[in-house]
Amino acid sequence: MSNLTDRLHRILDDRRTTIALVVLNVLVTCGILWASRSTILSDTWSYLGLAEGLLHGEFSMWWPLSTEHPDTFRTPGYPLFVAFFIKVFGTWKATLVAHFGLYWLALYLTLAVAERFDASRVVRNLILLMLIPMINVPYYIGQLYTEIPVLAAIALTLMVITRPGSRKWYDTLVLGLLFGFIYQCKPIFLLFPLGYALLSILFDRAGPNIRGNIIMLVTFGATVLPYAIWNYTNHGVFKATPLEGAGSYMHIGYWAGKTPGYTDRFYLQNVMGDEIIRFTPEDSIPAHIKQYEREWVGFKEKLAPFFTSKDSAMRAAATLMPYPAEGTYSTPYTMERERLLFQSTMEHYRKDPLYVLAYKSYSAVRLWVIGIQRKDFQQASMMQKLQMIYATASTGGLFLLGIILVPWAYRKGALQIRTTWPLVAYLLYFGVMHVPFTIQARYTTSVRFVFLILLALAIHGLWVGRGQVRKQAAA
């Protein structure tokens, strides 16, 4: 290394640098929380409604009604989490205090995991340095969303996975429980434990741990089973994920690129993002909106026979609810709607493959990069415009570094897939599984620390010209 890079390396390998970076991260995090203190994102109300429902003996947002409306929209993990803090402290805002503690726990564990891959303090300080501009992660401390608890749970799983030495039976038991918690917060996680077990057979340095994987999968299955049984008891369907979700979000995810700026009035009232990069000509948007609405009119006609008097009463009571609640329709109505939406999406995919390929490729990038909405940008003040540009530039810059340096590090031998595969598995799973749905950089928030570990390892490995793996993860 040259004198300049050698000096920079020494600075990053200094404990005083760690302290300074931690202080900066604390200040930035507190600043973000203060600036966003009056912002409440929309999903808050469904989580809060379900939490209150659980405290009143029902898993439903519509618990104040005399008729039962078992939920079809979410898994119970995070509502139970929120309900616990309401029960103990009397307010849902206590959950946000827990988020604050979990965020710093997640960061501490992330640094500990990084040390197992590379004992140099440089890697940990690189993580702390790159975290400072990543404003989208600490932002969710102040929101009633699943991102921060899942962030901490993933960091805990990596502590178990990378523990030096042979894995004990109780390690895999804990891993199964943690996977179960993540699934209960984010049902899209359902297939990850099975994928993890298969990949561990291929890449685990200690050799295939069949017994441990069986313990993990059985434990994970035990966490999934109660909700599947609940679905069967309340909806007559043995299903490990909510009755609605995949088809509806895939349908919106297809139409969003063709109807930028349009607000859906048929289902979830989603605002279709008007991205800087558009995938349809300006003059085609009105026609696409009409086509979308005609499609939904057709759905409504087909769904009419499934619409019950109880559904009608539920809709009529919407203004009486303590919090805004998502429509929870009868089981036949919900399942038929999901089937129609999924079927329609598959037909659109078949007829319009070039658009789907282009738009979903863009979506795959936007999952990692905060976007700028045209109308918001046009109406923003100069300071707000700069904030939007900063958010896009900071997340985009780190993503660009990642897609360049990480593959390069693997090619040069600075990273080894046999030790880092769990990190890659998390990033690929969250990155790929969310592509069919609506564009939201929020979906990858919970694996941002994993991304920082891999990127920091790649930077340092390329910097010194070899993989620094003095403390190998037993993964």
Image: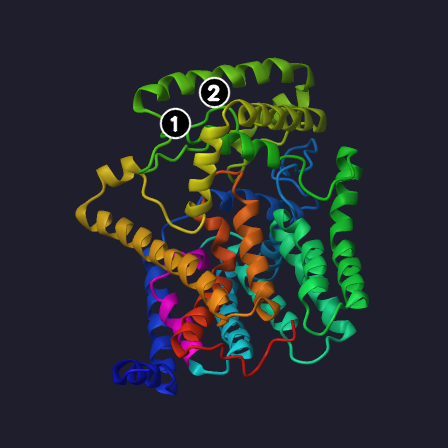
Label 1 to label 2: alpha-carbon separation: 10 Å
Residue 114's place in the image compared with 138, above or below, is below
Q: Is residue 88 left or right of residue 332?
A: left
**As rendered, which of 433 and 228 lies closer to the eye?**
433
Q: Is residue 61 visible?
A: yes
Q: Amino acid at mark 2?
A: Tyr
Place of residue 397 in the rendered image (x, y in percent of width and height, measured from the top left): 34, 57
- Neighbourhood count class around disc 2 (C-alpha, 10 Å): few under 14, some 14–19, many 20 upward: some
Q: Quadrant of the N terminus?
A: bottom left
Place of residue 90 in the rendered image (x, y in percent of width and height, measured from the top left): 56, 58
Residue in view at x 55 percent, y 74 percent = 113
Whether 130 is among the magenta residues is: yes
Q: Quadrant of residue 424?
A: bottom right
Residue 72's place in the image compared with 171, above or below, is above
Residue 413's place in the image compared with 301, above or below, is below
- Neighbourhood count class around disc 1 (C-alpha, 10 Å): few under 14, some 14–19, many 20 upward: some
Place of residue 41 in the rendered image (x, y in percent of width and height, measured from the top left): 44, 46
Residue with the mark numbered 2: 292
Residue with the mark numbered 1: 262
Q: Is residue 144 visible?
A: no
Q: Amino acid at mark 1?
A: Tyr
**As rendered, which of 407 and 239 lies closer to the eye?**
407
Mark positioned earlier in the residue sequence (1 or 2): 1
Q: Quadrant of residue 242?
A: top right
Q: Quadrant of the C terminus?
A: bottom right
In the rendered image, the residue lying farthest to the left is 382
Query: Which label sits on residue 49?
Result: none
Place of residue 9 in the rendered image (x, y in percent of width and height, measured from the top left): 34, 82
Task: Give the magenta range.
Answer: 122-142
| SS at circle 1 | loop
Whether 292 is among the magenta residues is: no
